[in-house]
Image: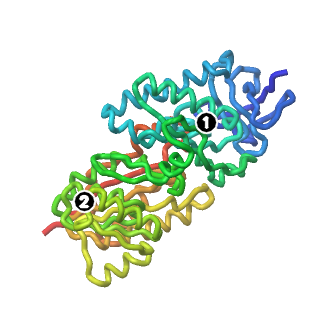
Amino acid sequence: MATTVTLKKGEGRTIKSGGAWIFDNEIDTIKGTFKNGAICQVEDFDGYKMGTGYINQNSKIRVRMLTRDPKQEIDSEFFRMRVQNAWDYRKNVMKKKADLKCARIIFGEADFLPGLTIDRYEDVLVVECLALGMEQFKKDIVLLLIDCMKKDGETINIVYERSDAREREKEGLKKVKGILYKNDYYTEAEAKEHVRSVQINENGVKYTVDVENGQKTGFFLDQKYNRLAMQKICENKRVLDCFTHMGTFALNAGLGGAREVEGLDISEYAIEQAKANAKLNNLEDTVGFRVANVLDELPKLYEAGERYDVVILDPPAFTKSRQATKNAIKGYREINMKGLKLVKDGGYFATCSCSHFMTQELFTKTIKEAAKATHKRLRQIEFRTQAMDHPILWAADESYYLKFYIFQVVWEK
């Protein structure tokens, strides 16, 4: 007997508006015998068929939807269609072939493959699976994607899994990390070495990506075109890049002709990577990096009289839950105040948030408060979000997380 999940009357607002999740408190009954991760049918309180997903009673996200077509079979042809659609979308929106060499190819709910992320770094795919229901399909999906890309002349030699986030435990899954697939191009030893030093080229900047030990899947692809936007305004400028990680914004500033760039990050490992990347791009004479706690360092720079033509803030998410949003607002306000104080009159200020709980409205309000508190007037140049290989599915709020502003700090004589 197929498992059927029936919603309470008046519930299911998220999926009815186009989202992908059904929470535990929205469900009235579950009929049928099943194991967690199993495919289930979803219907409204009145019996209206709403589609198919997979169920997990370990998670507050009780059902993740795979399709709105209740007649759609969840089989290899279904996943082939989903994978082909995801790949075709990237080919259409990322016209430069070089951009497809380092890109997010599958973005979970936004590609209708909930719980699954697949990033590409040249000949390596990196898989992150965070949902029990998707666990059973991940290997088949990977092979379908390799086959799909092969038809367009793209070669994938290694698939590395980075399913080592804590979210796995909420789903009743163990953390997993290691080679999921490799062809005969590399030996086992060569493959393990290769994933620690994959070289990519983004916006003309070269990076060495450590897929095994880097944050998330090894690199933050979502800021691709935001970094490119900064290249345009950094010529002959003195630039401070805060939370620099692998030196991404700093190196784009350097490539854009900045006369002096300094990148700060609390991680010694990240700074080592950033310095190596500066050398890789022959930018070590103009782009420097040092280990520092940004929150502590910015006031010290201000007191020392340091001022910059461009200040860039790319902090980690200050909140990963709705309950912590209030404290996150204080954190974003504080860091933006500290950053704004260091910008010369007429200079430029770039700031972002990568938490979907910090909505665009909240983030904008917080920046306004920081500007008012520091007596700075801001002229907006651009508002941007994540790169188009991280598409935003309306009603699936979790797919919209990155907010990025570029301002000029204006003054009147």
Task: Report the mark closest to the observer, 2 or 1.
Answer: 2
Residue holding disc 2: 282
Question: Quadrant where the C terminus lies?
Answer: bottom left
Task: Assign a secondary structure to mark 1.
Answer: loop
**Left or right position of 44 against 247:** right
Q: Secondary structure at mark 2?
A: loop
Residue 74 x, y percent position in the rendering: 67, 22
For this view, does 408 lie left or right of residue 413?
Answer: right
User: Which residue lies under the disc numbered 1?
Assistant: 114
Looking at the picture, how far across and down is residue 157, in whole percent? 49, 37
Quarter of the image with the N terminus in it: top right
Q: Who's the residue at 37% across and 73% down the image?
A: 290
Pick the front one: 138 or 187: 187
Distance in Å between CA atoms under marks 2 and 1: 41 Å
Residues 342 and 294: in front is 294
Residue type indicated by callout 2: Asn
Answer left or right for 269 relative to 11: left
The answer to whether residue 114 of the structure is visible from this angle is yes
Q: Relative to 278, does residue 45 appear above or below in the rendering?
A: above
Rate crowding at label 1 as few (under 14), some (14 to 19) or many (20 or more) other CA atoms within 10 Å: many
Question: What residue appears at the point 41 percent right and 73 percent down from the top-left corner?
Answer: 291
